[in-house]
Amino acid sequence: MAENSNQNTNVVVERLRSWSPNAISEVIEFRGETTVVVPRKVLREVAERCRSDKDLQFNLLSDATCVDRYPLEPRFEVNYHLVSIPRRDRLRLQVRLSSDDPSLDSLVTVWPGANWLEREIFDLMGIRFNGHPDLRRILMPEDWEGHPLRKDYPVEGYRDIPSIATRYTRNRP
Amino acid sequence: MVDTATGGSKTMVLNMGPQHPSTHGVLRILLELDGENVVRAIPDMGYLHTGIEKSCEDKTYSQAITLTDRIDYLNPLGNNLAYCLAVEKLLGLEIPKRAQYIRVMMVELQRISSHLVWLGTHAIDLGAMSVFLYCFREREEILKIFEFVAGQRMMTSYIRIGGLALDLPAGWRQRVEKLLKMMPSRIDEYEELLTGNRIWMGRTKGVGYISAEDAVAYSMTGPTLRAAGLAYDNRRAFPYSSYEEFQFDVPTRTDSDCFGRYMVRVAEMRESLKIIRQAVDKITPDGPFRTEAAGIIPPEREKMKTEMEALIYHFKIFTEGFSPAPGQAFATIESPRGELGVFVASDGSPKPLRVHFRGPSFINLQALPKLIEGKLIADVIACIGTIDIVLGEVDR
């Protein structure tokens, strides 16, 4: 089983390399998972290729998420987890972004299901998706300040919430 | 937020929720209506956002398990399993077969109980009161098994990294056997009440249609996708926890409406019973219920009394935790609602760098406007019910 999936992923990497030598900047194999690191500029083309190529057929976008490696640079890693239902294969596309310009092309045109996933990343991580049809906050209130999942955002938040003890004493004469 | 599509001349905007009972939690939908027809629907959520992903980053790998229970509160064991599979993948741990079978049995029991809640609430939304009572009667029996095995009815935290929290207690087999004997006829009862019922068919047949292409494009998974004709099931496509050793069918339909999804879920309950039957036979009375890995899995109590090393490891695990090698892992399971994925990234410290949950409720809900736009407002209720969302998982 493991061997089989390994062969498949090699096919994927070779296929993408043969299509364009600039499509892949790095391939990471870890615990049986293949991560293809893609330059930001070609992400949408690579994604479109992954979906429509007859030998790849990654028709389902399973997940999109982001990792904040603050204070390291490039700070953000955006991961797209793809599934090929007919070929029973998985692939992770990764794009690395620096903190001075955390933006990349939206994949909503490739997989409409990317819409909310990208909104969530925008909301919680502050990554901008160019060409996204509806880039609004999705989980946090619309007037929220900051992006809570960033590493420089404190777990308790910025808002000053008085403790129960102070509230209790304040109301007493 | 809403600028009406038709220029605001004929349409009105109706705010549905977040306290509407049929939204199964705190989902708010802005409906733009032309008479009784829905022109546009905009789901709005986040009312239950508790920042679980952020909290996980502040806990050790083992501590975060208790948070996973609270994401999809109808499927806590499944969440435990998905999270533990991801961390185990990161660590490269092998789990004993016996523990894997127990996991399968527990998760399949959970699937039945989750589908029962879905069926009961979906039916009550559409006006069938008695089905709700029947479903909760059987769900209670399953929750009693959970309480017996794990000590908790709902937030079990029973599945742990490397295996299970406890071994199965004496007498578990009789209880599960009793349930297995009882359930098939009970599922027949629900079907008798609903499947041929003209009101039920009227409210569900042809309602909430989505084509297979759209379902895939909108990343839908689980019974919703299978009712559209695609037999994509993680237990088959990417087997985990020894699912490849179990015989079961993946029920599919082609009608892709509320009725089709109902039929798929009912068939899934029967398949789950088959899997539980096989798991019960596979679980040996004795054997390990978790793996052995120094520094990761707590040592046995007896060993701590005689071995210095065991005592040191015990202390280290419960004070500092363990540190997986830097890397990322993504593990998926088939939850009752679809593909539940957990992404864990490690930077080599005892706390996860990032934990992300791919909640099937969240992603399936995305297609709701597709299901209801252009349809009648009365069908909105049926469509919300049919995707089977848990708002705890949508908002996390």
Image: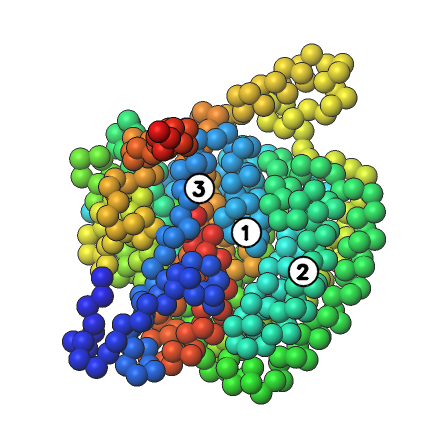
Answer above or below: position of A38 versus B27: above
Give the quarter of the image for residue A99: top left
Q: Pointer 3: what residue?
A: B52
Image coordinates for residue B157, horizontal then vertical, percent: 61, 41
Q: Which amino acid does label 3 sit on?
A: Ile
State whether discs 2 and 3 lie on one chain.
Answer: yes
Give the quarter of the image for residue B353: top left
Provide the secondary structure element on which disc 2 rests: helix
Provide the secondary structure element on which disc 3 rests: helix
Q: State which tag comes first along the sequence, 2 or 3.
A: 3
Q: State which tag comes first along the sequence, 3 or 1.
A: 3
Image coordinates for residue B309, horizontal then vertical, percent: 67, 14
Q: Pointer 2: what residue?
A: B139
Q: Pointer 1: what residue?
A: B73
Nearest the camera: B220 or B193? Answer: B193
Chain of the residue where label 3 is placed in the rendered structure: B
Identity of the residue furthest to the top in this view? B308
Q: How far apart are marks 3 and 1 (CA)?
A: 13 Å
Answer above or below: position of B304 versus B146: above
Q: What residue type is labelled 2?
A: Arg
In the displayed structure, does residue A137 sit left or right of residue A165?
Answer: left
Nearest the camera: A165 or B296? Answer: A165
- The reply to whether the C-beta atoms of the residues labelled 2 and 3 are less than 8 Å apart is no
Provide the secondary structure element on which disc 1 rests: loop
